[in-house]
Image (cartoon, rainbow, N blue to C red):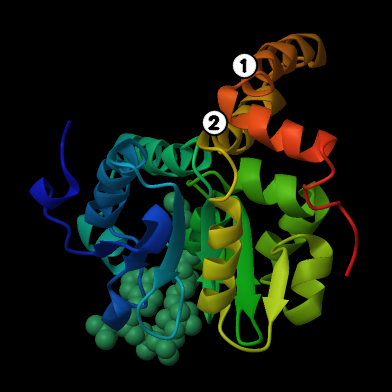
Amino acid sequence: MIKIEQKPLVNLDVEMGEDNIAIVSLNRPAKRNALDAATIEEFVTLFSILPREGAQAVVLRSNGDHFCAGLDLVEHFNEDRSAADFMHLCMRWHEAFNKIEYSGIPVIAALKGAVVGGGLELASSAHIRVADLGTYFALPEGQRGLFTGGGATIRVADLVGKSRMIDMMLTGRIYKGQEAVDVGLCQYLVEDSAEDKAMELARAAVKNPPLSNFAICSAISHFQNMSPLDASYAEAVMAGIVNTQPASRARLEAFANKTAARVRPD
Ligand code: 1HE
């Protein structure tokens, strides 16, 4: 198996922390973590390896004040790409972000500052998004004379609905704070550190059996791509595997013995 150390990472940084929670950092703060072609390749590489190197969860964060400023506009300008070139590039973005969404391990994005354009496409491929009070979300593609190419038409539309996404793209509307939560752009809004909250959520998630997390962090996304009939069949197959795993026996026994925690609000 390829080891992370064997793959030189420049624009991303990875550190395997406690409980096998990998902390992946975007590391181009001087460019506001804009996504150039090289960074996308690093995402493909990293998320091909991480689940097989024992990572049980990922906290995706950024160095600097902004999570991600989206497509590297300067590189795009300088490259003066053809339509075909850009289509091929978009397919690498899709490869990278699909690797995140379908990774089978929880990926929790800790957001701050700008989460815009391709930055929002990246964030929306994570399974959980945590924002702080300074985080803001936008799709400025229309103003730049561009269109989304990293999966926003699927994932952002899924989060906020088609009409809101069209409004964001046509008018440059920015969402932040509680409104961002209310429209579905993030699930958590914290006054303090989004990274601390993301770590707390990751620590909770890794207490689940890895097979359960595998299903949660891949099957739900796959099933959404299927017809309801096929999805319900696939759900039964997945539940057959997950719900009979050895790791669930002790948990079920604890419930039956009345030693397991009950599901109650605080
Ligand atoms: C960049 C980028 C970038 C910053 N590509 N270099 N995304 C956007 O339309 C967002 C563009 N960026 C901004 O609006 C602002 O930079 C921020 C609000 C994110 C941050 O503002 P600020 O004042 O902190 O930074 P800055 O002075 O604008 O930029 C600092 C440096 O980062 C500067 O480089 P420098 O070499 O002159 O110091 C900027 O050029 C650089 N920088 N953002 C390249 N995006 C698959 S299709 C997806 C389509 C999209 O993503 S469209 C959305 C693009």
Mark 1 vs 2, N-terminal side? 2
Q: Quick check: 128 above or below 90?
A: below
Q: Is disc 1 in contact with disc 2, using a CB cutoff of under 8 Å?
A: yes
Q: Which residue is mark 2?
A: 211
At numbered mark 1, what does the secondary structure look like: helix, strand or loop?
helix
At numbered mark 2, what does the secondary structure look like: helix, strand or loop?
helix
In which image quadrant can residue 16 be found?
Answer: bottom left
Using a 10 Å C-alpha cutoff, classify the residue at mark 1 as few (fewer than 14 neighbours), some (14 to 19) or many (20 or more).
few
State the residue at coordinates (54%, 73%). 111
Q: Which residue is mark 1?
A: 241
Name the amino acid type tagged 2: Leu
Of all residues, the one furthest to the right in this rendering is: 265
State the residue at coordinates (77%, 47%). 260
Quadrant of the image containing the N terminus: top left
> Residues under labels 1 and 2: Cα distance?
9 Å
Quadrant of the image containing the C terminus: bottom right
